[in-house]
Image (cartoon, rainbow, N blue to C red):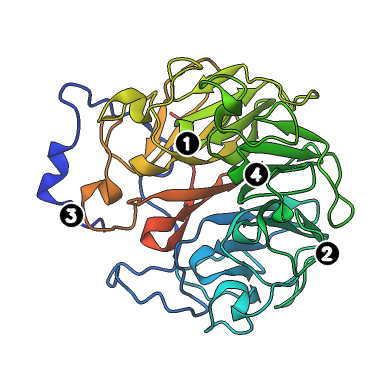
Amino acid sequence: MRVARSPAFEAVKAPGTATAGVPLLDPAGPGVILGWTEDAPAAPIAPARHTLFGPRGLCLHPGGSFWVADSGHHRLLGWRRVPQADNRPAEILIGQTDFTREGRNAKGPAGPATLNVPTGICAWGRGLALADAWNHRVLLWRETPCESGQPADIILGQGDPAAVQANRGAARPTAASLHWPYGVAEIDGRLVVADTGNRRVLIWDGPERSGQPADRVLGQAGFETRDENAGGGVGPLGMRWPHGIAAWQGWLAVADAGNNRIMLWDGLPSEPGAPCEIVLGQAGFAGCDHNMAAYYPNAAALNMPYAVAAAGDTLIAADTANSRLLGWSEVAMAAPAARLTGQPDFACKGDNAWGLSGRDTLCWPYGLSVLGRKVAVADSGNNRVLLWDLAHEG
């Protein structure tokens, strides 16, 4: 049963702009919640098998397992099968020596099984790719881990498993270095990484060994620069804070959170520094203000979108700072979203809709994963994960 909203709720939408939109996710609410109970929404966040602290990434793996980057506890949690009931305890732990422990790199030196603010995660072939953001690296497992403490097989962004410096300690990036990588995706067999601190996206055609350099770059003219918006004004080439990545209707979608937009390329570009062809969230390539420079959002506006995912022909975005999820089916410049979850209409915003957390509210949704009709949402501000079905058509 939904928790009542605060009296202030009705005051935070623009007069005369209350377009409800079509539900994106099942209006009945998520079927399963991990890390939260309705009778105790302020439950302790001490590390345990069933608790989460600011989770930022998750993966509904095609092999049937489920993975959550429990970012605040510096660990990766795994379930051998997607949980079918609330607060099912995790079965696999990577990043810590015990489910009750926390701390960056397990309060010791870095290695192939330690983590420091893990974020984006995706299926990589039969295995996993994990953005180990504050160790400035991406960890790859050729097969999904089957036991706790299983080390990664490949490390990208660093020269050895103990190294943790941004850009390998250099002032400028290279094709083999990373600085705060937050997003990962596998697209057409290629690994695509949002190298967020370097304001670029890197593409590996087929990573096979640790330290391997990327093959292509987007967001910069070359591998050796890391300038905000490629050193110029906001436009179709540069980025400010790239994060989530997805393939949608043949397009490459990148959530450029710092410019409050989603950039779209028609397929994976073959040339370095290729400009995008379309943006969502802004009226044109030069726009960058949150909610299109308005206080209130609308169906076409975004405020720090951190995640994107494709559900069939629908692009889903976590419009993070507006605490809502948006869905598009139309590929067009500045197209408005048609579907909405997390707010009663497109003109509303606010954490948990300016009320208490309820089973179907959102507070800073940060990560998305889709498999079939199932959508996993990292509801980071509520320290939980939601497993939610898509709404039925019509």
Q: Could you say where residue 268 lies in the image, as x and y percent from the top left? A: 74, 28
Residue at the spot 13% in from the left edge and 37% down from the top edge? 11
Q: Quarter of the image containing the N terminus?
A: bottom left
Helix, strand or loop under label 1: helix
Q: CA distance from mark 2 to mark 3?
A: 48 Å
Pick whichever of labels 1 and 2 is earlier in the sequence.
Answer: 2
Amino acid at circle 3: Ala
Task: Name the mark nearer the viewer: 1 or 2.
Answer: 1
**Residue picked out by circle 3:** 4
Q: Could you say where residue 350 lies in the image, as x and y percent from the top left? A: 27, 44
Q: CA distance from mark 1 to mark 2?
A: 32 Å
Helix, strand or loop under label 2: loop
The answer to whether marks 3 and 1 mark residues whose Cβ atoms lie closer than 8 Å is: no
Is 89 drawn above or below residue 209 in the view shown? Answer: below
**Residue picked out by circle 2:** 153
Q: Could you say where residue 277 lies in the image, as x and y percent from the top left? A: 62, 16
Query: Which mark, residue 195?
Result: 4
Amino acid at circle 2: Asp
Amino acid at circle 1: Gly
Left/right placement of residue 264 relative to residue 272 reads: left
**Residue picked out by circle 1:** 258
